[in-house]
Image (cartoon, grey):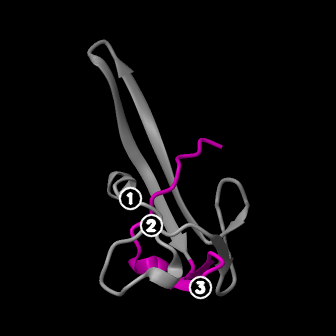
């Protein structure tokens, strides 16, 4: 997803047309009650939490996914030219990885 967005310049919300892939940048406003990220305890509109086990043997290192959880809430993104509602369950999300 991040490679797709890298090919797109910023689109102002006032210029967005339906049925297209765009990159919008703006302030994220929750539409409803936020969720709580399980490891940090922070309130947020989206999280994906994964627990991995790293196994080191004489043949090398491998990783195994032990547990995964994801939750989200719809948001409004406002950029000064308009507002866009993002239905997070249907959105392709690209977020930086955190190891906190």
* Real-space Cα separation, disc 1 to disc 3, in angstroms: 19 Å
Secondary structure mostly seen in magenta is: loop
In this figure, which residue is indicated by the disc labeled 2?
Answer: 23
Q: Name which quarter of the figure residue 81 lies in.
A: bottom right
> How many numbered discs sit on the rendered protein?
3
Mark closest to the chain's N terminus, 2 or 1 = 1
In this figure, which residue is indicated by the disc labeled 3?
Answer: 83
Q: Residues within 10 Å of mark 1 (few under 14, many from 20)?
A: some
Residue extending farthest to the left is 59
Q: Is residue 27 above or below residue 59?
A: below
Quarter of the image with the C terminus in it: top right
Whether the magenta-drawn stretch holds residue 71 is answered as no
In this figure, which residue is indicated by the disc labeled 1?
Answer: 5
Q: Residues within 10 Å of mark 2 (few under 14, many from 20)?
A: some
Mark closest to the chain's N terminus, 3 or 2 = 2
Dot 1: element:
helix
Which residue: 36% across, 40% down? 64
* Real-space Cα separation, disc 2 to disc 1, in angstroms: 6 Å
* Real-space Cα separation, disc 3 to disc 2, in angstroms: 13 Å
- Residue 58 locus on image (x, y percent): 31, 12
Q: Is residue 66 visible?
A: yes
Q: Specify the segment rendered in magenta.
A: 73-100
Q: Residues within 10 Å of mark 3 (few under 14, many from 20)?
A: some
- Residue 24 locus on image (x, y percent): 50, 70
Q: Is residue 35 above or below residue 100?
A: below
């Amino acid at each position: 997803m991040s490679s797709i967005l890298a090919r797109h310049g910023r689109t102002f919300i006032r210029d967005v047309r339906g049925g297209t892939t765009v990159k919008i940048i703006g302030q994220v406003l929750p539409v409803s009650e936020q969720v709580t990220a399980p490891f940090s305890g922070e309130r947020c509109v989206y999280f994906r939490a994964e627990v991995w086990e790293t196994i080191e043997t004489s043949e090398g290192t491998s990783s195994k996914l032990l547990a995964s959880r994801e939750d989200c809430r719809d948001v409004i993104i406002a950029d000064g030219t308009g507002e866009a509602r993002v239905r997070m369950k249907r959105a392709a999300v690209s977020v930086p990885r955190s190891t906190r």
